Amino acid sequence: MVRVGLTYNENHHKHDPLLNGYPGPENPSRLDLIFSYLSDNRFLDDGRCFLFRSEPATLEDILRVHTKEYIDRVTASIHQSRKSFGQDTYLCESSFEVLLRAAGAVLHAGDVVASGACDHSFALVRPPGHHAGASNPGGFCVFNNSAILVHFLRDVCGIKRVAILNIDAHASDGTYGIFSADPEVLCISVHQDPSAFYPHTGFIKDIGVRPALGLSINMEMPPRSGNKEYAILFEDVIDKVMRKFDPEIVILECGFDAYYKEPLSQLDLTIDGYYDIIGSLASQWKVVCLLEGGYHEDIGLLTAVVLEGLMGRRTIKDGIDQIDLLASRNVNTRTEFQEKLSRLKLILGPYWELDNPLLCSVR
Ligand SMILES: [Zn+2]
């Protein structure tokens, strides 16, 4: 029986833009929606999902990634002008405790998998983390949860080879900045083309720096890319790279804003797409999922889809007619995607022995 662990930061309500007097998409209703869906659909008494309480992370855990100066800036901002910490990043009076609880839940999710207590896990935490760098906030992110987990797995659990895969609609720029020169971490981000989209970084040409060239992979998905484009990308590149790297644990930066209903982005993954990505990962690797973005009404449903993917047991059906979805999109999407995929294979070929797309087209 596959055992899946769940953790969350139960004090997340104290991090809420309304406490600063204005509304915003990254707010407590996100986790509330998720937990009400899971409890209404009996995921929490299913016998295969185990909900764990966790302790807050310590300052030592955070300092493995973030600088002391940056942490001091976070705490000082909380006491001074909370509303202006970053462009989209807000802080409330109790945000520091919320952030430590979020990181603690992430570490616990990693620990139950590293110890073998669970096969996979999902840390349902907010705010998200993948835009935060070692000394800067980004998007709605303050601390980079996946980076904090990588360092914990290495230093405390003795896990050496970790892969991070971002499927949030936005490039995982914070994580890339932290690991682009780290030869022990494979860092893959699949996101909407950032040419005209936040964070405006994360291009195919960004493959890390020495001594980790080729260990960072960024794929720009053209707007309206959906299940089929993701499936081709995984089959042609990501699965091959992952099998060569052979990670002991995969950290999935699991954003739900690549979903077709997401108002903040223009990608078209549906339930089938999410299930196939997670199901395939979980059938090959130990997976620790971390909640990143996703600001639409179906994030509870998608969390359940991810849990079913981790368990390898599918009950939730996809109600979307793919033909209708394809008909509504730009006819150039597939062509643009194929061009970008060819460029990705060309640039990564020397590092991962991928098929050379130029040779293929000659055949
Ligand atoms: Zn996002």
Image (tube, rainbow, N blue to C red):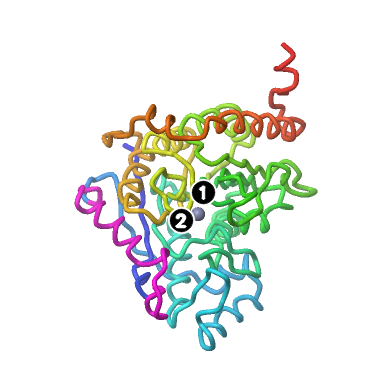
Indicate the quadrant containing the C terminus: top left, top right, bottom left or bottom right: top right
Distance from mark 1 CB to nearest ligand 1 atom below 8 Å: yes
- Specify whether residue 203 is painted magenta: no
Label 1: element kind: loop
Where residue 64 sits in the image (x, y, percent)? 62, 66
Question: What mark, if any, has residue 293 been given in the picture?
Answer: 2
The number of callouts visible is 2
Amino acid type at image mark 2: Gly
Task: Using the image as rendered, state which of residue 48 and residue 116 is in the foreground.
Answer: 48
Distance from mark 2 CB to nearest ligand 1 atom below 8 Å: yes
Name the residue beneath numbered marker 1. 169
Residue drawn at (60%, 55%), measured in percent from left and top?
154
Task: Using the image as rendered, state which of residue 3 and residue 251 is in the foreground.
Answer: 251
**Magenta part of the chain:** 15-44
Where residue 312 sits in the image (x, y, percent)? 35, 34
Q: CA distance from mark 1 to mark 2?
A: 8 Å
Could you tell whether 72 is left or right of 227 in the image? right
State whether residue 145 is above or below residue 2: below
Residue drawn at (63%, 64%), measured in percent from left and top?
133
- Specify whether residue 29 is painted magenta: yes
| Residues packed near mark 2 inside 10 Å, few (<14), some (14 to 19) or many (20 plus) | many
Q: Give yes or no for contact between labels 1 and 2 (Cβ–Cβ under 8 Å).
A: yes
Residue drawn at (55%, 52%), measured in percent from left and top?
170
